[in-house]
Amino acid sequence: MMRSVRISFALLLWLFAVASLYAQHAYFPLAIGNTWQFKDAQHQFVIVGDTILQDGHHYSVIYDTWYRLRTYERQQGDSVFRSGSLLYDFSKNVGDTVWRQSSIVCILTSIDTVNYWGRRLRQWHFVIEYDHVAAEVHEIVDSLGLVATAVTDGIGLGPLNGATIDNITYGTVSGVDDLISLPNSIVVEQNYPNPFNPITRIPFSLSRKNHIQATVRDLNGRLITQLADSQFDPGRHEFIFSGSQLSSGIYLFEIIFDNSRSVVKMVLIK
């Protein structure tokens, strides 16, 4: 009888530990200075500041040093938002729809645990489908954030070589771009709204006069339209793009300057 009670008590403790593991809130690190490096330091994200967007909320400013692109993210409870739109929801169950926008849907497909640098952490897989076809997979790890992506019609992101999170370095982080030099280049922001129908705006800033080539292409690289091939003065600018003559799908805004290239993924929904 005593042994049976002990076994039952041990089982209850184990069940409680498992329940606690999956009931705790997810931490999506968005502190200034946090850095993620992928693919032998060729691709890295750095949180360079924070700002208030038009919805009145504070967002962390994430700079992608490979594409020279800024995005804006914040966490509220178990939800992560990007520029006002829901991006991830860690309170969902496997199989749940996280968000839906016309023919685009984000589904939480799995929750498991993984080992990262000696720590056992939870991992979520969010799959984004376009017209019922899986097009993107985002791997999110608790307290580390985005660790990898897989893209059906393009190049994914990963693996994560190292990260500096809240002043603690995991793995290998080396050769971080000198952010002081960034103002001497172009800064391209995510288009808004995104998804859009049919008009969207693509902001960018220049610190000095520069020749800009800007185009919109489809995922196969075919040219849709050329937005610019001329000199631009220093300051903030934006392109206005209309997809009124296009079908729903993903389009790429590409801007070329000083032999460098930035790309923004835009989603048209009709």
Image (spheres, rainbow, N blue to C red):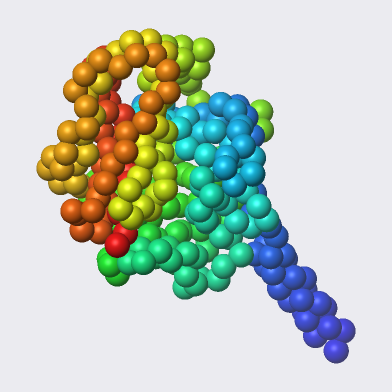
Q: Position of residue 9 (x, y in %)?
A: 81, 77
Looking at the image, the residue that sits furthest to the right is 2
Number of dots carrying numbers: 0
Q: Where is residue 173 in the image (x, y as percent from the top left)?
A: 50, 26
Instruction: Tell me, yes or no, if residue 134 can be seen here.
Output: no
In the foreground, 75 or 267 = 267
Looking at the image, the residue that sits furthest to the left is 222
In the foreground, 1 or 123 = 123
Q: Position of residue 181 (x, y in %)?
A: 46, 12
Quadrant into which the N terminus falls:
bottom right
Q: Is residue 264 left or right of residue 19?
A: left
Kindly indicate the quadrant of the structure image that contains residue 222: top left
Q: Is residue 37 left or right of residue 165?
A: left
Instruction: Tell me, yes or no, if residue 201 can be seen here.
Output: yes
Tell me if residue 55 comes above or below residue 177 in the rendering.
below
Residue at 50 percent across and 65 percent down: it is 98
Tell me if residue 176 comes above or below residue 54 in the rendering.
above
Tell me if residue 54 comes above or below residue 209 in the rendering.
below
Q: Where is residue 32 in the image (x, y as percent from the top left)?
A: 62, 29
Residue at 42 percent across and 18 percent down: it is 235
Kindly indicate the quadrant of the structure image that contains residue 270: bottom left
Residue at 83 percent across and 83 percent down: it is 5
Tell me if residue 18 comes above or below residue 256 in the rendering.
below
In the foreground, 54 or 70 = 54
Looking at the image, the residue that sits furthest to the bottom is 1
Q: In this view, does 19 lie to the left or right of 50?
A: right
In the foreground, 24 or 185 = 185
